[in-house]
Amino acid sequence: MSILALFCDVDDFEQAYAAEWEHHLLTHGKRLRHHAEEMYPSESMTILIHFHQSCYRTFKHYCLKYVQVALRQEFPRLLGYTHMVEIVANYLVPLAVSLHTKMGVCTGISFIDSTALAVCKNPRIASHRVFAGLAQRGKTTTSWFFGFKLHLVINDWGNYWPFV
């Protein structure tokens, strides 16, 4: 899938999702401020999805060596690596919803893989409070972590199902 086709798909989803998300937000009687980001949410989500489709092992190398060089014309208001890392957490829920909307039907032939979603470093487990009661210790083939394990099942047609 080309970067343009991916962006169009993500942008269509993000426009529908943003309207629904705003409708369900609790306001506590106060007006919500909308801070203008330098990039549109659909641009940031496209970069995040494209990173996982690329052959880069780290987001840092992907941003610095590919996005900043090869995709600068496609994203004229591109953020630097440090700022991109700061806003990645803002797109966790929309990306999860996007994955959920693209789930396919089981055809009988499936491939499964998993990855660790660490929420903090191991020495900070006792003082970590954000996912208290939800995150757990887990093990990958190489190390221990504290957080969640994401399982992804892909059928022979390329449809997928995420499980946390």
Image (cartoon, rainbow, N blue to C red):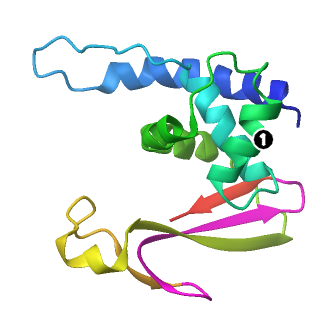
Q: Position of residue 147 (x, y in %)?
A: 40, 71
At 66% from the left and 20% from the top, the residue drawn is 12
Q: Position of residue 7 (x, y in %)?
A: 74, 26
- Position above or below: 124 against 131: below
Q: Position of residue 86 (x, y in %)?
A: 43, 41
- What's the magenta region? 140-158
Residue situated in front as seen by the camera: 97 or 82: 82
Residue 91 in view, yes or no: no
Three-letter amino acid code at the position of disc 1: Tyr
Residue situated in front as seen by the camera: 77 or 9: 77
Q: Position of residue 110 (x, y in %)?
A: 81, 70
In magenta segment, residue 144: yes
Quadrant containing the N terminus is: top right
At 48% from the left and 45% from the top, the residue drawn is 92
Q: Is residue 3 left or right of residue 99?
A: right
Picture quadrant where residue 41 is located: top right
In magenta segment, residue 59: no
* Magenta highlight: main SS: strand
Picture quadrant where residue 123 is located: bottom left
- Position above or below: 161 against 98: below
- Which residue position holds label 1? 66
Under tag 1, what secondary structure? helix
Residue situated in front as seen by the camera: 110 or 46: 46
Picture quadrant where residue 127 is located: bottom left
Residue 77 in view, yes or no: yes
Local crowd size for mark 1, using a 10 Å CA cut-off: few (<14), some (14–19), many (≥20) = some
At 45% from the left and 83% from the top, the residue drawn is 138
At 35% from the left and 79% from the top, the residue drawn is 122
